[in-house]
Structures are given as C-alpha cells and as structure tokens.
C-alpha cells in the first residue's frame, strides 16, 4: 500500500488505532478494515478503486458513519469522504437545483439555501452531521416524508466512478438516448444492455411487480429498486429512464458517487405548530394517526413510554420534556405549517375534537414558536437516549425499519406484538408513524449467545410478517449487513438472482462494499460484541456503578455520531472535532477506543495502551458530551479515569504534576508575588519556564495578586456579618484566591450590599486541576475533605456560593461519584445547594429579596460567553437573567461552544494551535465583531484568559458587571 499512499493527494492510514476507529458505525456490527483513506479529489478515488481491483480488495464508501445496518463496516479499504469532499459545486436558484460533493452535511446545505427560501426536502434525525452521499446511499427520508418523499425522489443526477475506474454521469435520458448507451463498448454500455435484456421480459416484469413492496409504500429500500425502472418509457412506462432510481438506496455497492445534483423545494409556510397528542395506549395512538393524516399534516411522529422515560436521564433532553403531562404510553407529534397562527390553532382544535370524538387521547398541547425545536430535539434524540437504559440488554436494530401501508399499520402492529409475545420479548416503538414506518426495537442482550440467536429469529419472523402485508423490511435505514440476508425471502429467489446478476454486471470483481444487499452473510455474524465473552471489569476511582462499570460507560456510545456536528449547528460537542473534522477527535472515537481495549487488552492494566492515550489526548474535558450526547457519554470522566491508570503504568509527567499542584505552587509564589510575577512575565525567564514545562511560549501566564482572597476576607471580617437577608457560605476557589482576588472581593461586597451575610470556613482547594489531569486519588482526598467540611453546614437556607464555575460545580458533578462510599450521601446532600453566584442571585430575585431598582438605569450592551461545565451541568439562563436585571442592560449570549482553553489544555504546547482554532470557530470572531462600547462577560477564568490571548479584549466576570451596576 506504500505505492498507493505515495500516489494519493489525500491521506492513507494503516495503523491499528485508525482502523479500529472505523471498525464500527452506528450498528451492531464490527469488522476491522484493511486501511482508511481520506481522498481529496476524484483522482484519489479512482486510484483506490484501481488498487483494490489489482489487489483483490474492496472499497467501502463512508461519510458520517451513522449507518444503522452495518453499511460502512467491512474488511477492505474504507474511503471517508467527509473530510475533504465537502464542497457545494453549483447552485441554480432559478431551476431550483444544487450540485454537491458527497461530504456536504444536510443541515449546512439547508443553512446555505435558507436566504433564497429553498431547501432540500428529505431530512433525517441525524441532519446535523449526515451527508448527502450517505443520504443517497441509504435513500434517506426523515420525519416529513409525507410531503417531501425520499432522497431518491429529489436526486436528479449522479456523477460516479465505476468499478473499472471509468467516470460516468447518470441522469434522465430518453428511449433513444438509452439505446445509444446500449451501443457503447464499455462497462457503462454493459450496464445499460444488461438491464435492457433483463427487464424486457414481460414475465420478469410481472414477477417484480408481484413480489416487490406495494407501490403505495414510498419509504422502501428492499434490494435494488428495479421495480421503479419498469415505470420508464424504455419498458412501457411514461417516465424518462434514470439509473439514479437504483443508485439511491444501493449503499455504495454499484459505483462510487463523486457528485450529486439535487432538486430543491420552496421553504414551507412561515408559521408552524405541533399538536403533541397524549395517549393511554399505543393502540389508541396508532388509530389516532389515521385521524391526524386526514388533516393534512407535514409530519406525524410517534414516541412510546420507553423512549420518553429514557429522556429523563439526559441533561439536555430532560429540559425538552416541558410539554408532557403525566406518563403517556405514547405521544403523537403532529406538525402543521400554514400562513397564519390562526390557521394552526384552528387545525389543532379540529384534530383534538376529531380524536376526542373517537375516544383517543387525553392531552393535546399546541407547541408554537421557539419551543418547536425543543420538541423535535426530543424526538430526534430517540435513538441515542435508548442507550441509557441500564444493563446490557438494549433496544437493538434488527426490525427497526419496517414499513407498511399506513392504513394497515394498526393490524400490522397487532400481529407484530403477537410475534414478540411468542418470543417473550419487549419492544420500543417510535418514529415515522405518519408514513407507515415505526422504528421497532426489541430489547436484547447481544453479549449473550442465546439473544444473538433470538436476534436472527426475530428478524426472520418479522420479515415473514412484513411480506404478509406486502411491506418493505427497510423504509430508510437500508439493508446492509442487517437485512440483506432476508431479501430473497422478501422478493423471491428469482428476483434476488436478478439483483445478483445486476451487481455482477456493475461490479464484476466485487470491489464495491461487498456483503451488502447481495451475498450478505448471516445477520448475526461479525457483531460488535463477542457472545459469552468473560470480561473483567477494572477497578476504578470514580464510581461507575450507575452504568455498571467503566466498560459499560464507554459502551453507552451507540455510534449515532452526534459528536460529529460542526460549529455551524451550534452546541459545544465536540470542540476538537469541530476544529479538526477528524473522526479520531470525536467522542465516538474515544468511546470506541476505550471499549476496544477494555474488552480485548491482554494486559493486567487494560488502560496501559498508547493508542488510547493518543485518541483521548485531544479531549478538552469540556463536559459537553455529558449533556449533548443523547447517550450521556461523559468523556471527561472517562478520560480522567483512564489517565490515572495510564500514569500508574507509565509514570506522571513533570508538566502534569505542575498543573495538578498549581495551587501549592501559587501559594508559595504568593509569599513574594512581585518577584514571582517578574519571573512569570519577563520575556526571558517566562520563555524558559514555559519551555521547561512544555507550555506554549505564545501564552501569557496568569499573574498572582498582591494579596490572596483568603487574606482579603479578613479585611472585610466586620462587613461579612452585616447582612439581614440571610447567610451564605463563600467557596474560596483556588483561582479566585490567587489570580482573581478582585473578583472575590467584589463578590463579597456585592452580597453585603444586597443584604447577605457572607460566611467562610477554611477548606481545601476544589481539586479541579487534579481531576483535569487525571490524578484522581489526590483529587478524591481533597473532595472528601471538602465534603466533610461542608456536610453539616450547607443547606437550602445556607447555600455554598461559588465564583469559578468549574470549581463550585465539582460539588454537583464529580464529587458524588468521586468520594468514598461512606461520604456519597453527604456529597449528594451538598450538591443541590452548591450554587454558582448567578444561580443564587436569580433564586433570591424570584423570592423578591433582590429587586431591579437596586441597579442602575444606564444603558449597556453585554455579550456573554458561558463556561463549558456551566452549560453542561447547570445553565447559562441564570447568568442571562441576572445580567438582564438592570432595566437598560441588553444581554445576548455568544453562540459559542468551548472557548478552547479548557483549563490547562490551551497552555500546553502541543495543544495551543488546536486551542486557538477552537476559539476562532465562533468565540473570537463574535468578540471582535462586538462594539467597543459593549462588555464581554465570561464567568470562567480560563475563558477570560483565552479571550484576552485571542482577541486582546478584556472580559469581565458577570459578578464584576453586577457590582458596577449597583446604585451607590
């Protein structure tokens, strides 16, 4: 492969680490590929195809890797187009089409089209990261297929490379043009001649029409869609011939797509509304679906009680449950789009009346405006949150994509449940009920051989049931490794042999994605987990009992790829991927590498692998995955645990020790702060210190204050006790104590002036630096001291108030799982009463103890950058509300994720460049664009430092702003 690597403009990787990261997708399958290629152009793709042909290997096209049926898992060369082939080639607004490379992300395409009131109609729950090549390969549909149909319906042309390396364009052609193609002396000519000869036989046509799914079922991916070719004028129909109909849904098994021309549609009417109908039974919801469809909605989606229950345990999705009443067995999300809100309200009333008249439903909230995306986010999280179900038995993909005519859906589900009852199995029901497709996920433990056999049994039985209703075994997720085995059953052996001949004609040497659709191995082979394998769960410092151990904590990741969204989609997860667009920098990659080595390592210490270190190294420990990942994978916690065990085997580096012990170093430096600051900030000495410790020389090191906050507290001893509105305890964190003393002083003064008594006790540092560097045993000692110190004095009436988010939130986030078992209940008791200053402020404002009249009426524009851990564990809403209290203060939140500094991460020389790239995604440009008169607010000390280094602007802690806003 060295020769191929030298010829490519892009990249080729054969190292074991990279190959492991591409061994899985979002399915239950695992197969380590031979190599991974990131092509930069069409020439690279042709080189890989020619190499595969010469070396009897295979080519597996891949975009975001969110396939649910194992489409992009294979032993050949994985060709990942998501890094470089991401360009929009041409847009024709008049004719409403766009031409794109296969790595263009759906949401980002629609963002580009929005100013022209155009968009690509089909959308999937993975729209923030799924790419057009994958959508064509799977013939994706999405929630609004009632209106917009499938990707196939909107694909006009495909440019592709065939298995012999030749380039072709597939588009609408007339009968005479078809005949001209048949005269070509090339592989392209072979392809046209073969289909002409096969489908010209009227008996073959009848057999296809008899066995293929009902034409009324538009969501269908059963084998190759040759039945649609019968509607063309070449075979007696009225439509123009276009191979695109077959390539859509072909899963990369026939050709390699290099460009796609897509039809665009006008954006829907401006006013939308969701009727979120609640039902006491699933059956009632299925029958009510037919009523909903009579009112011409744009989408009807189902969520059952199991999915809804799973959303309770996800930080982000729990906030999106605002519209739920009681515990419904199922809900229907019915979307309408019209010109006015009055029309929406009338439709909502009509739907409710129609359903109540039939005795269906008990609650029909209408969701409007900015709350609509929250409901859709809850629905889209359905796949991911199912991983939160405790234990090894999980709702699995096997029959999750069946599609039948919507009119027979209630009968089909009734028979489906009978099959489950016979197997003594439970199931999850959710998704596209309005189009006759429900994602049905039986609960199985694929770590047990018994359930692996049941996995196939249930697949076979449901395939027979789907055939009885003349449905499609796949509506949009594709056949892949999961359903390919059952295609002969679904369409008949003779039709299946026709598909095999078609594949052989297009791909004589089996280069393209073998084992999918045709000649598929048994669907319970090459699974992610080895059945009945005994795995020793390693001992850990953090408590992972809720997940069932650290291995199961890593296994929460199901590969859905939410961590692959870019900064354009918003949110914080995952900053390293957003800056690099490298799969190895995703939360998914980190979870995969941990799972692989914790499962297969032969070493006594399974963490002792350089490959794990390399993949986890770029994790900024921002905590975004804890809240934004639907499966709630807490990679910061996993990384910290890994590092402790890795250092046990390999020793603790000097820099790591220095960072972890920064409080002790600062304490010594504070004895002579002037001299210490001279050495830290003098160009010559600071450069020497940075290079010695491995810090970036371009970074400025925070200066020590003349007096620590602990000493300043003594100066305000009298004022500390003057409050009449109640008492609070101030947590003097290690950053406010040594570097941000002035903020601590203003905190005390602000609380005093608002009427609060401020108490302090001598306590330990938070341990944040130790946790961030993975020295968990030391961090545990500090946490336990603090829990013992505060356990008996902290309550709702006397809360613990913090200045630096990362330190005070340790009490809520890490401490309950870090301290010893004997202190966990005490830690949990402290947790809800450990508050950031803004949380306490807003709580008191809502009680009426703090009033707007206490503050200035002068005008001020504020731009807020929230702290990562604050966004993940708490919220920026209290900060926004506090800063908005002065009547003429205008506050807006910068839609940034992580600032890029992330504690010490951005100081480290090998991470400095990435740190600044993260800052440049959203934060730095927003700060530079802010007017000089506006104020930049950032509660995190490292955030303020990053803003200063990256933009040369000073950012203020929100406490400073509120102190300055007080009327004198």
Image (spheres, rainbow, N blue to C red):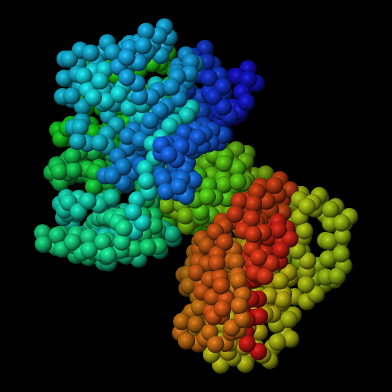
Which quadrant is home to the N terminus?
top right
Q: Position of residue 886 (x, y in %)?
A: 56, 80
Asked whether 30 or 605 is in front, the reply is: 30
Residue at 24% x, 15% y is 199
- Height in image: 196 above or below 578? above
* Residue 878, placed above or below residue 357: below
Residue 870, image x, y percentages: 54, 64
The part of the image, by quadrant, that contains residue 733 is bottom right
Whether residue 831 appears in this view of the structure is: no
Answer left or right for 431 relative to 714. Answer: left
Q: Is residue 565 visible?
A: yes
Residue at far right of view: 684
**Residue displayed at 41% across by 6% down:** 185
Q: In which quarter of the view is residue 142 placed?
A: top left
| 416 horizontally vs 591: left or right | left
- Tell me the residue at 45%/25% (across/down): 159
Q: Is residue 144 left or right of residue 869?
A: left
The residue nearer to you, when weighing 419 against 392, is: 419
Count of labels shown? 0
């Amino acid at each position: 492969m060295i020769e191929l690597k030298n010829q490519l403009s892009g990249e080729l990787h054969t190292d074991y680490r990279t190959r492991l990261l591409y061994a899985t997708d979002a399915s239950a399958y695992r197969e380590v590929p031979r190599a991974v290629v990131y092509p930069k152009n069409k020439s690279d793709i042709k080189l890989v195809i020619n190499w595969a042909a010469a070396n009897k290997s295979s080519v597996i096209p891949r975009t975001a890797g969110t396939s649910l049926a194992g489409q992009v898992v294979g032993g050949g060369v994985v060709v990942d187009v998501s890094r470089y082939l991401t360009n929009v080639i041409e847009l024709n607004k008049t004719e409403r089409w766009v031409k794109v490379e296969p790595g263009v992300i759906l949401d980002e395409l629609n963002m580009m089209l929005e100013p022209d009131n155009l968009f690509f109609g089909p959308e999937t729950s993975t729209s923030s990261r799924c790419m057009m090549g994958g959508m064509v390969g799977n013939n994706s549909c999405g929630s609004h297929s009632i209106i917009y149909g499938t990707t196939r319906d909107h694909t006009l042309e495909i440019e592709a490379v065939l298995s012999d390396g030749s380039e072709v364009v597939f588009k609408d052609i007339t009968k005479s043009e078809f005949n001209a193609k048949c005269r070509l002396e090339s592989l392209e000519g072979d392809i046209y001649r073969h289909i002409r000869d096969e489908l010209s036989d009227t008996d073959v046509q009848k057999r296809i029409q008899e066995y293929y799914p009902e034409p009324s079922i538009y969501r269908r991916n059963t084998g190759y869609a040759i039945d649609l070719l019968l509607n063309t004028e070449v075979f007696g129909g009225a439509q123009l011939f276009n191979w695109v109909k077959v390539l859509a849904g072909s899963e990369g098994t026939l050709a390699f797509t290099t460009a796609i021309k897509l039809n665009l549609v006008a954006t829907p009417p401006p006013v939308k509304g969701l009727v979120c109908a609640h039902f006491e039974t699933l059956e009632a919801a299925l029958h009510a679906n037919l009523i909903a469809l009579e009112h011409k909605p744009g989408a009807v989606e189902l969520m059952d009680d199991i999915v809804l229950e799973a959303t309770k345990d996800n930080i982000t999705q729990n906030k999106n449950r605002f519209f739920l009443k009681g515990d419904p067995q199922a809900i229907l999300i019915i979307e309408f789009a019209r010109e006015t809100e009055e029309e929406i309200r009338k439709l909502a009333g009509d739907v409710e009346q129609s359903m109540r008249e039939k005795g269906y439903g008990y609650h029909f909230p209408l969701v409007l405006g900015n709350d609509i995306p929250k409901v859709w986010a809850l629905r889209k999280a359905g796949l991911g949150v199912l991983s939160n179900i405790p234990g090894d038995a999980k709702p699995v993909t096997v029959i999750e994509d069946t599609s039948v005519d919507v009119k027979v859906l209630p009968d089909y589900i009734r028979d489906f449940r009978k099959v489950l009852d016979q197997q003594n199995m439970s199931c999850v029901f959710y998704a596209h009920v309005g189009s006759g497709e429900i994602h049905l996920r039986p609960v199985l433990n694929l770590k047990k051989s018994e359930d692996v056999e049941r996995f196939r049994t249930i697949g076979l039985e449901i395939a027979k049931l789907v055939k009885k209703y003349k449905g499609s075994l796949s509506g949009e997720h594709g056949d892949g490794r999961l359903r390919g085995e059952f295609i002969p059953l679904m369409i008949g052996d003779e039709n299946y042999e026709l598909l095999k001949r078609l594949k052989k004609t297009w791909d004589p040497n089996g280069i393209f994605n073998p084992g999918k659709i045709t000649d598929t191995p048994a669907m319970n082979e090459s699974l992610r987990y080895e059945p009945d394998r005994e795995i020793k769960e390693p001992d850990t410092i953090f408590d992972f009992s809720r997940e069932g151990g650290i291995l199961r904590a890593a296994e929460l990741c199901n590969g859905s790829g939410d961590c692959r969204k870019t900064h354009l989609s918003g949110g914080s997860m995952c900053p390293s991927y957003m800056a690099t667009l490298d799969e190895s920098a995703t939360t998914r990659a980190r979870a995969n590498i941990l799972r692989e080595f914790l499962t297969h390592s032969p070493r006594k210490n399974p963490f002792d692998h350089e490959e794990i270190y390399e993949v986890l190294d770029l994790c900024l420990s921002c905590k975004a995955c804890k809240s934004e990942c639907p499966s709630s994978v807490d990679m910061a916690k996993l990384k910290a645990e890994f590092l402790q065990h890795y250092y046990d085997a390999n020793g603790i580096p000097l820099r790591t020790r220095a960072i972890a012990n920064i409080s002790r170093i600062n304490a010594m430096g504070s004895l002579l702060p002037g001299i210490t600051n001279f050495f830290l900030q003098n160009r010559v000495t600071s450069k020497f210190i940075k290079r010695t410790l491995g810090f970036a020389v371009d970074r400025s090191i925070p200066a020590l204050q003349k007096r620590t906050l602990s000493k300043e507290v003594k100066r305000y001893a009298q004022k500390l006790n003057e409050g009449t509105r109640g008492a609070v305890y101030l947590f003097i964190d290690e950053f406010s104590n040594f570097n941000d003393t002035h903020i601590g002083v203003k905190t005390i003064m602000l609380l005093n002036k608002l009427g609060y008594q401020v108490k302090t006790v001598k306590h330990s540092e938070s341990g944040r630096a130790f946790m961030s560097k993975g020295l968990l045993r030391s961090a545990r000692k500090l946490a336990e001291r603090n829990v013992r110190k505060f356990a008996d004095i902290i309550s709702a009436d006397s809360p613990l108030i913090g200045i630096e988010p990362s330190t005070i939130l340790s009490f809520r986030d890490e401490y309950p799982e870090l301290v010893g078992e004997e202190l966990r209940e005490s830690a949990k008791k402290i947790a809800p009463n450990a508050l950031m200053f803004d949380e306490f402020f807003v709580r008191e404002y809502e009680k009426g103890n703090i009033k707007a009249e206490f503050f200035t009426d002068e005008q001020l524009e504020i731009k807020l950058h929230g702290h990562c851990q604050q966004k993940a564990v708490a919220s920026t809403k209290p900060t926004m509300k506090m800063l908005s209290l002065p009547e003429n203060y205008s506050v807006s939140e910068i839609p940034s994720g992580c600032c890029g500094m992330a504690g010490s991460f951005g100081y480290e020389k090998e991470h400095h460049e990435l740190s600044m790239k993260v800052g440049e995604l959203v934060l730095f440009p927003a700060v530079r664009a802010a007017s000089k008169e506006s104020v930049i607010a950032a509660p995190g000390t490292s955030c303020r430092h990053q803003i200063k280094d990256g933009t040369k602007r000073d950012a203020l802690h929100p406490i400073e702003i509120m102190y300055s806003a007080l009327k004198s």
